[in-house]
Image (cartoon, grey):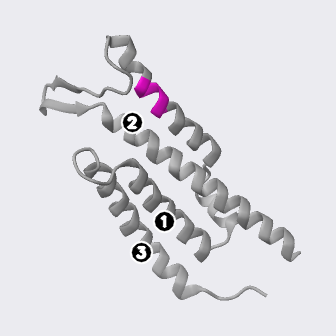
Amino acid sequence: MKINDVILQAITKLVVFMIITFAVFLFLMGVDNPGGGFVGGLVLAAAFVLLVLAFDIETIEKGVPLDFKKIAALGAFLVVGTGTAALFFDMDFLEMTLIEFDVPILGTIHFETVLLFEAGVALAVVGVVMTIILSIGKDVDQWKH
């Protein structure tokens, strides 16, 4: 017998967007302030965990067809890649820099390479946390049957 969680599911659909917005805010503020990839990744993973709690794992896997192991690997690749990329420009390992380029309509855009590093950390955190949560959830479902 499945429990009817209509209220939880309806609230979750609204709250998840607020959580994701807050995660993006924390991620972007982490370049110059406390926060960043780790905290933003944890909050983003919390949004996915809330979806898993409100709905079942199969529904989430159909709605969000992501392989979280590959996301964690991509994050780790970005972290290591941004660290070693500095070596090719005669800089120290993990030394970050500011890149400026002109876009015809928008003008000068400032891009800090630390944003790529933080994106890698966020992806690695989301991938690892969701892989753990989904594997625990699948094990619990197997124990029940």
How dense is the environment of label 1, judged by Cα within 10 Å: few (below 14), some, or many (20 and up)? many
In the rendered structure, which segment of residues is drawn in magenta?
A: 78-83
Is 67 colored magenta in this rendering? no
Q: Give the residue number, with chain letter if any, for mark 3.
A: 14
Label whose residue precedes the other's in the sequence (1 or 3): 3
- State the image coordinates of residue 116 (x, y, percent, origin top left): 37, 35
Q: Residue at x 54, y 79 (%)?
A: 9
Measured in 3D between alpha carbons, the distance from the residue under mark 1 to the one under mark 2, in whole angstroms, is 22 Å
Query: Can residue 67 be seen in the rendering of this structure?
Result: no
Which amino acid does the dot numbered 2 rest on?
Phe
**Callout 3: few (<14), some (14-19), or many (20+) C-alpha neighbours within 10 Å?**
few
> What SS does tag 1 mark?
helix
Indicate the secondary structure of the residue bearing disc 2: helix
Which disc is residue 47 wearing?
1
The residue lying furthest to the right in this view is 145
- Residue 145 horizontal side relative to residue 56, left or right: right
Vertical relation: 5 (above or below) 100: below
Residue 53, compared with residue 60, is above or below; it is: below
Residue 117 image label = 2
Q: Main secondary structure of the magenta part?
A: helix
Residue depth check, mark 1 versus mark 3: number of the one nearer the observer: 1
Q: Is residue 2 above or below residue 46?
A: below
Disc sitting over residue 140 in the figure: none
